[in-house]
Amino acid sequence: MEILINPIVVSVVVLCVLCLCKINVLLALMISAIVAGVVGHIPISEIMSTFINGMGGNSETALSYILLGAFAASMTHTGLAPLLARKIGNVIRSNKYLLIAILTGIAILSQNLIPVHIAFIPILIPPLLHIMNKLQIDRRAIACALAYGLKTPYIVIPAGFGLIFQGLLADNISQNGLAIAKNDVWHYTWFLGLAMTVGLLVAVFISYRKQRKYENLDIKEVDDVDIDEHFNKNHYITLFAAIVTLIIQLWTNSLPLGALVGLGIIFGTKAIDHDKMDKLINEGIGMMGYVAFVMLVAAGFAMVLKSTGGVETLVNAVTPLMASNKVIAAALMLFVGLFVTMGIGTSFGTIPILAVLYVPVCLNLGFSVPATVILIAAAAALGDAGSPASDTTLGPTAGLDADGQHSHIWDTCVPTFLHYNIPLILFAILAVVLF
């Protein structure tokens, strides 16, 4: 009973139900935060002040998305993004699986080799929608492919965002009594990558293999641009600006500063006229502003959840149920990880919470090092794919819904939740048995 009335469980269930009932994600997050506060016995006035104060936690991310949205609009206005889309179209011809493979590969590179995260999606995907419509590709398959590329690399590949995630995992597990080197993490988490790959294959070749028809609606930012068949001076300037943006980001560890410098190069060299500056910023806000604000509200929601003390209460409630059965213990750990990550919206932020509580449990039950690492990694990653407020789902929707024919909840969140969280749970439990 204590589990059922836990603020984390209640609020996450309310969030999911509201989203499935097509309540706007922003409103669903706010309502769920209030529910969490009430269940956690926090006064209403304090709930809202905590919520608003917590929104600052994602302020840098939100600003990054706005500026990157403007940068994406500039790439479209110079004709570079539509030109690249056309080049991709010429390569794939009528092979939809090749298109899915290319987009998956680009998504993977965005996490590790060129760590721009979801910034490439509003640049590249909208110009490709007409090609997807022609091939009658089910966009749910594309959403799953993009989510795979955004999520799997940080679990498996020790570079870029993956190096950060695996470093956090190693540090927090070691601090709680089980020594493990950062370079050893991927030797175990590849098993979770295999789970994600199974989910992707099921989504692309089974669940969404059938054709799905979409209307060829206008995409203003794309259709208003005259596409040059060959690379011109403005294209090369825009590419140079993109490279400088990446260099500045890696050098200063500041994505907003990188995007600002990139925009400065584009306008400073007059690749785009100064009189279009306001229009581009407005388009950037229109393109990524919703995603940015959802991330702000999600941070407020997470702050309220943390203030209720529900995480510790939930863990304390399920720990006695683990007894001495490893499979039951693993399932309960994953259950808690799913709810926590769905609630606070970040796999990276979930690691310290779970490691301090569960590493001692794993040691007491005699879990091997590989099984412990896989369990903690899976518990932290669960919920990231499928959460309405996660950039793993918000990113694909930002591109695929450019013409208003892709539902964030039913076409991105539900497919990614089913195809990735279920395999992650099954493979993590299997790891306890095999390793």
Image (tube, helix red, strand yellow):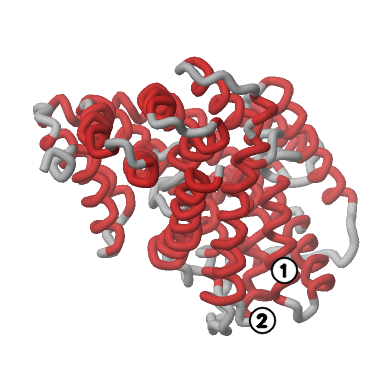
According to the image, label 1 marks what residue? Answer: 99
Tell me the SS state at disc 2. helix
Q: Is residue 305 visible?
A: no
Quarter of the view holding residue 21: bottom left
> Disc 1 marks which amino acid?
Leu
**Residue 153 image point, x, y percent:** 65, 44
Q: Earlier in the sequence, mark 1 or mark 2?
A: 1
Labelled disc at residue 135: 2
Tell me the SS state at disc 1. helix
Residue sitting at x 23%, y 43%: 9
Q: Choose between 93 and 425: the one closer to the eye.
A: 425
The image shows a total of numbered marks equal to 2
State if disc 2 and disc 1 touch (CB < 8 Å).
yes
**Residue 297 image point, x, y percent:** 34, 38
Residue 186 vs 17, above or below: the answer is: above
Residue sitting at x 29%, y 55%: 16
Residue 220 vs 214, above or below: the answer is: above
**Residue 295 image point, x, y percent:** 42, 40
Q: Crowding at label 1, few (<14), some or many (≥20) Cα neighbours within 10 Å? A: many
> Disc 2 marks which amino acid?
Leu
Left or right: residue 143 compared with residue 12: right
Left or right: residue 368 compared with residue 387: right
Quarter of the view holding residue 132: bottom right
Residue sitting at x 62%, y 25%: 254
Residue sitting at x 39%, y 23%: 360
